[in-house]
Image (cartoon, helix red, strand yellow):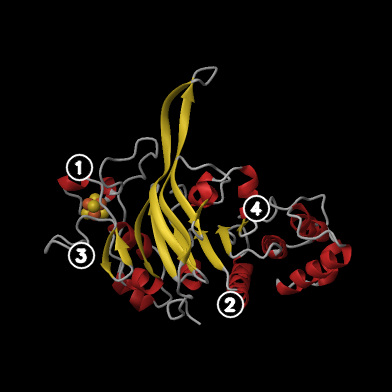
Amino acid sequence: MNAETKKPASGEPILEVRHLVKHFPIYKGALRKKQVGKVHAVDDVSFSIAQGETLGLVGESGCGKSTTARTIVRLQDPTSGEVLFRGTDLSTLKGGEMRRMRQNIQMIFQDPYASLNPRMRVGEVLREPLMEHGITRDRGELDRRVKRMLELVGLDPQFENRFPHEFSGGQRQRIGIARALMLEPSLIICDEPISALDVSVQAQIVNLLEDLQRELGLSYLFVAHDLSMIRHISHRVAIMYLGALVEVGDCGDIYQSPLHPYTQAFLSAVPVPDPAVQKERGRVSLEGEIPSAIAPPSGCRFRTRCRHACPRCAETRPEMRELSPGHWVACHLAGGEPGTRPA
Ligand code: SF4
């Protein structure tokens, strides 16, 4: 089924990110005591994810999407903002409380080679979270759960005695997915889970994630820079530029009618299989370099590369506005003032 026609389960959001900020201070001097600036990695990012929904978070390398993902699960502490999981603010939880909460929120990492302990057999990798979280220490129960999980992710249960180096990249990512699922979470943060894999196995992993979502009702935050994969797997898409969201909406709206000039340029770089359509569509080229996240531009962060920029864009940061149901855009001119709307 095409991602643009399938509907996520509706209902209360399982995750709400509100005004999330993550700055990294920059220190100078031998003792690194004097702060001389900060990297604005994530600046006032807000979005939500419903039960059974996949939100694709996409942007160029260094735009802050992975930092957003890591801050949500508290691999890094946020500078400010709220991360509400079923109403509980994760950003205020202390060590033990957050550890317990991780039972519900798991992460799949980009590099399946680096995310598995090379000295542990697959069975041990999968049993570890169950024992650490006190779910069970019963040997028979642990073995049953490991075998069932290996089958669920499409691996032979006999593989539990092998070491990670005995597997291909795609198989290792399946093990990473199995490990994330052992605690039966309801939300999985997928941080570029396919970008380290061969193109031939990327689709297999994405299909597996979709099957698991249907079977288990999982919600995903799917971080990637590959727009084609994001389109395939996501119900909604959030576009990020220099630490801020610029457009959020249903997959179909974003890909067919992008309203933010950055989204238009970003999407126009994705090749279309039909050469005639490709030729007619043309390409919106982006001028200049991405500004430094240490000193982002005033007002709209995209203004130094935007062909529609006007004085107002330098003075005021554009708020996210809902221009059609569920389609949010952070641009002063999008959908508004006649004759000035970004083409
Ligand atoms: Fe361009 Fe101004 Fe819109 Fe920013 S607010 S995207 S600079 S037109």
**Nearer the N terminus, badge 3 or badge 4?**
4
The image position of residue 35, as x and y in percent, is: 44, 24
Looking at the picture, tell me which residue is in the foreground, 276 or 48.
Answer: 48
Q: Looking at this rendering, what residue extends furthest in the left direction?
A: 338
Q: Residues within 10 Å of mark 4 (few under 14, many from 20)?
A: few
Q: Residues within 10 Å of mark 1 (few under 14, many from 20)?
A: few
Nearest to the eye among marks 1 and 2: give it: 2
The image position of residue 284, as x and y in percent, is: 30, 61
The reply to whether discs 1 and 2 touch (Cβ–Cβ < 8 Å) is no
On the image, which quarter does residue 173 sit in?
A: bottom right
Label 1 – label 2 distance at C-alpha: 46 Å
Mark seen at residue 315: 1
Nearest to the eye among marks 3 and 2: give it: 2
User: Residue flagged by tag 3: what amino acid is it?
Assistant: Gly
Label 3 – label 1 distance at C-alpha: 20 Å
User: Residue flagged by tag 1: what amino acid is it?
Assistant: Glu
Nearest to the eye among marks 2 and 4: give it: 4
Label 3 – label 2 distance at C-alpha: 36 Å
Residue placed under numbered mark 4 in the picture? 100
**Nearer the N terminus, badge 3 or badge 2?**
2
Under tag 4, what secondary structure? helix
Under tag 3, what secondary structure? loop
The vertical placement of 83 against 201, above or below, is: above
On the image, which quarter does residue 295 sit in?
A: top left
The reply to whether discs 3 and 2 touch (Cβ–Cβ < 8 Å) is no
**Nearer the N terminus, badge 1 or badge 2?**
2
User: Residue flagged by tag 4: what amino acid is it?
Assistant: Arg
The reply to whether discs 2 and 4 touch (Cβ–Cβ < 8 Å) is no
Q: Quadrant of the C terminus?
A: bottom left
**Nearer the N terminus, badge 1 or badge 4?**
4
The image position of residue 193, as x and y in percent, is: 59, 60
Residue placed under numbered mark 3 in the picture? 335
